[in-house]
């Protein structure tokens, strides 16, 4: 990373929040705040006109949500979400954003974010651009890639290579070969972004990739069992078993 300052735009509809973040960032001499925005449309204009390297972007803003702002901009900055709603933040963090700050946050939490920013700026090819990740994660069509944390970085995982997804408490585990990736996203939300022709929910806790299923075989009274290419066997719920038989799978 060079000694040149990193340009920053702060986008938040709350003046107090903008002022607080501006004051905390003042202690980082390597950052230069070049603009602010108080609405979604204003954030789009500021990002495209000022072309900052880093944007602190509130999710809940008038005009456009922070996630929607990223669909409208042409410039591609690093993005850190700021939000008071954890349910918005966790999905964006795991599947897209460089980091997120859950309001209210203080200097210590911000310092950890800035460490991640410096690492990302110092290794510009170490991870896919945040905008690409967010478009993949928050778009309307089926996802082709997941972005997961691994060995301190963010790596892309082709959805086609995931044989099955497993709900585990508040998380989802993606099984891809011998690898296991943890996602902070409900299974139902993930299911909505998967290709329904390829991925089938066979149980309240399991989704399988039909391209990785060898066969569905009888299992117990009125149930089926899915056998995967890697040898994994998953019990299908009774309701799903009836649907699968009706489909002739």
Image: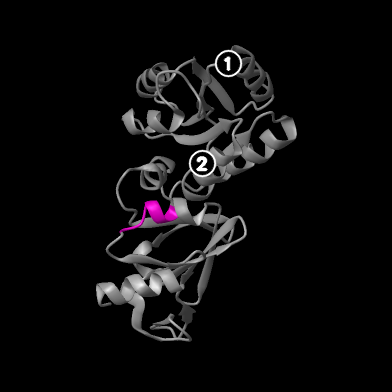
Where is residue 226? Give x, y as percent: 41, 80
Q: Residue at x 33, y 70 (%)?
A: 243
Is residue 187 shown in magenta? no
Which residue is depicted at the point 37% across and 62% down?
Answer: 159
Which numbered mark, 1 or 2, is in the foreground of this view? 1
In the depicted structure, whether residue 20 falls above or below residue 82: above
Question: What residue appears at the point 60 percent right and 39 percent down from the top-left corner?
Answer: 86
The residue lying toward the viewer, choosing from 43 and 66, is 66
92 and 197: which is toward the camera: 197
Specify whether residue 117 is in view. no
Residue 71, given in percent of the width and then of the height, sits at 34, 33
Marker disc for residue 176: none
Placement of the C terminus among the 4 image quadrants: bottom left
Residue located at (67% from left, 40% from top): 112
User: CA separation, marks 1 and 2?
Assistant: 28 Å
Q: Dot 1 lies on which element?
A: loop
Crowdedness near tag 2: few (<14), some (14–19) or many (≥20) residues, C-alpha within 10 Å: some
* Residue 14, label in figure: 1
The image quarter containing residue 162 is: bottom left
> The residue tagged with tag 2: helix, strand or loop?
helix
Mark 1 or mark 2: whose residue is earlier in sequence: 1
Q: Residues within 10 Å of mark 1 (few under 14, many from 20)?
A: few
Question: In the rendering, at what x and y percent does residue 191 appear?
Answer: 41, 56
Q: Could you say which disc has been placed on residue 121 in the image? A: 2
Residues in magenta, as a range: 190-195
Q: Is residue 66 above or below residue 198?
A: above
């Amino acid at each position: 990373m060079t000694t040149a300052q990193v340009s920053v735009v702060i986008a938040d509809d709350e003046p107090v929040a903008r002022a607080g973040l501006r004051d905390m960032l003042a202690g980082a001499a390597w950052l230069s705040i070049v603009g602010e925005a108080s609405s979604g449309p204003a954030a789009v204009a500021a990002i495209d006109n000022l072309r900052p390297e880093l944007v602190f972007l509130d999710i809940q803003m008038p005009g456009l949500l922070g996630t929607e702002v990223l669909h409208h901009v042409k410039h591609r900055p690093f993005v850190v979400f700021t939000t008071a709603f954890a349910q918005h933040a966790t999905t964006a963090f795991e599947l897209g954003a460089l980091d997120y700050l859950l309001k209210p946050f203080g200097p210590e939490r911000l310092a950890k974010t800035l460490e991640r920013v410096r690492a990302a700026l110092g290794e510009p090819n170490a991870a896919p651009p945040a905008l690409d990740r967010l478009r993949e994660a928050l778009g309307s069509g089926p996802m082709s890639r997941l972005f997961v944390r691994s060995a301190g970085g963010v790596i892309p995982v082709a959805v086609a290579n995931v044989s099955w997804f497993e709900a585990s408490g508040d998380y989802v585990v993606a099984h891809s070969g011998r690898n296991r990736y943890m996602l902070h996203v409900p299974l139902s939300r993930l299911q909505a972004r998967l290709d329904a022709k390829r991925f089938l929910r066979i149980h309240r806790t399991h989704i399988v990739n039909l391209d990785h299923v060898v066969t569905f075989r009888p299992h117990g009274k009125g149930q089926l069992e899915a056998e995967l290419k890697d040898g994994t066997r998953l019990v299908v719920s009774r309701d799903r078993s009836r649907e699968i038989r009706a489909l002739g799978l």
